[in-house]
Image (cartoon, grey):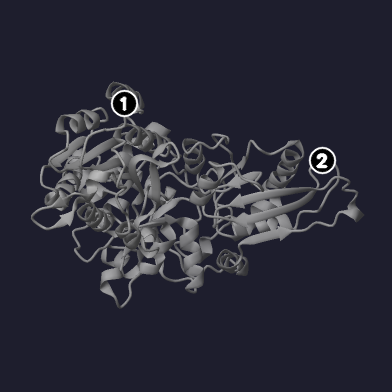
Amino acid sequence: MGRHSAVPVRRLRRLPVLLAAAVLLVAGISWGAVVLVRARTGCAEPVTLRVVAAEETAPVLTRIASALPPGTGPGCGTVEVQSRDSLRVVEDLALPQTGAPHVWVPESTLMLRRAREAGADIPTSGRSIAGSPVVLALDEQTASTLGWPDKTLTWSDVLGSADTALRVGMPDPARDPVGVSALFAARDTVKDKPDPGAAFAELLRRLSPNMVAGAPELFNRLPSADARETLTAFPTTENSLLRHNVEQGGRGLVAVYAPLAPALDHPFAVLLGAGEAERAAADRFLHAVEAPEGVQAFADAGFRAPGGQALRDRSQDGRVVSRDLQPATMPPADEVDLILNQWAGINLSSRLQVLIDVSGSMNAVEPVSGRTRMELTREAAQRALRLFRPTSDIRILTFATKLDGDKDYREVLPMAPVSEQLARGAEATLGAIQATPDGQTGLYDSVLDAYRTARAEWEPGRLNLVVVMTDGRNEDSHGISREELLTQLGGLADPKRPIQLIGIGVGPDIDVAELQEITAATGGQAFTTPDPGQINEVFYAALSKLACCN
């Protein structure tokens, strides 16, 4: 497929009030409960089919469900559609729950993969019910400076521009499938460079500073009075761009298409927990979605057919794309993981498990400052929160011996983005950590369990790390041996899904060789100093090492 023209989305006369209504539904409806009349229809055994869907498709599915007659026989009953963030669904499906959905319609098959990686027992794929290409959105002024409308713009024109005023935003690829698609499109723009790898790394560095958690946030950073917050280009879906321009009266953003940007395919996945009756109800609902009336509902909301075919003729709207597209599909998991690891190495968006030693020796006073090792370590941990990107995820655990029943460790802060941790008072929580007077250093068991958790929760597109801060050596005679720890760490390590163990050892009692051997088993590294007063410098050195070498 050749490159497509940049398109102003103006005066969308044929995208009617229905699309505007869909926008309102997205903004205002969380649950669409369609209660079907039962007694008068012969539905002897009504079923409640629970459907969760991504924000873009939930209003359309609600509309289709509301027009669905109750029917008779297997699968008759009620359809409930809930709009839900796909990452939240991934987390929910990985845990046992009551009232679980029977059908999930995420924005991309990639989210089904993510859920399986998180431990959810769900299908690997679903039936695509709509398509939306990933495009590069430009404000019209920026597009005109690059030669539009006389020139057919490409992603290379935008990303390769020398215009220093051009600021390109990026949704976090570790969270948003739009970001993953954008990485593949961006890589294609440098394939003909003398050194494509170096050129791609440089391009990622340019995109990284303007990263946000998800694509919808980028619309809040369009040109405004605050130049620091302004973005002039960013990846999004064609559907989101259309909806934005409808809200703006048909003006505002120009779409630039890329043949190698995988489209969002909106898979209809019947989850494995659905019973026979719910599966019959799902089949009935899917049939309605794919019926002419259902297809029309998706067309009215600005979607394309699953294969990229245009569902309505918009040729009278000027230079709006009305022809069929052939967008790329999401590459295999290994290829996605590879490009996300490249992004993580540049971006330093992380997923961390941090272990803090609270054994009795942490109450020792450092002679120069007159402060305890615990005080210095708490302060380093507090500062560390602000060293990572707000989108980085972090969990904090303390360890000694038998802190939580037979476990040598206890969770202090659950896994959450740094921005949320700070908003919830994480610094105060860390400042309240106390050493256990009689506690020993249960290093081996704590490290192994934290690493196992990191392996189970491994997330592509991030630096997955386990960081242990300690002032001593393992003292738990009832735990595993060093040999057992090294063997198990070696078995858990996977070069395709790297998780580095970073050791930060301070104080005269640290066993440097022990810490180096443990961290080396995962491809990690130990940073040590006999002076507890240097813990901040050691911590920063560790992070700098990660920044330069990943």
Front residue of 187/477: it is 477
Q: Of the residues shown, which amino acid type is indicated by label 2?
A: Pro
* Left or right: 47 as drawn, with respect to 256: right
Which of marks 1 and 2 precedes in the sequence?
2
- Determine whether, in the image, residue 157 is placed left or right of residue 130: left
Q: Mark 1, residues whose alpha carbon is within 10 Å: few (<14), some, or many (≥20)? A: some
Observer-nearest of 488 and 367: 367
Q: What amino acid is at disc 1?
A: Leu
Q: Secondary structure at mark 1?
A: helix
Total count of labels: 2
Q: Is residue 209 above or below residue 259?
A: below
Where residue 381 appears, as percent x and y from the top left, is 26, 53
Q: Nearer the viewer, mark 2 or mark 1?
A: 1
Asked whether residue 89 appears in the rendered view, the answer is: yes
Q: Is residue 146 above or below residue 131?
A: below
Residue 32 drawn at (x, y percent): 67, 60
Find the residue positioned furthest to the left.
368
Quarter of the view holding residue 361: top left
Mark 2 and mark 1: Cα distance apart in space? 54 Å
Q: List the residue tagged with mark 2.
A: 74
Sort mark 2 into few (<14), some (14-19) or many (20+) by Cα contacts within 10 Å. some
For label 2, the SS is loop
Residue under label 1, please give it.
Answer: 485
The N terminus: image quadrant = top left
Residue 22, position as x, y percentages in the image: 59, 64
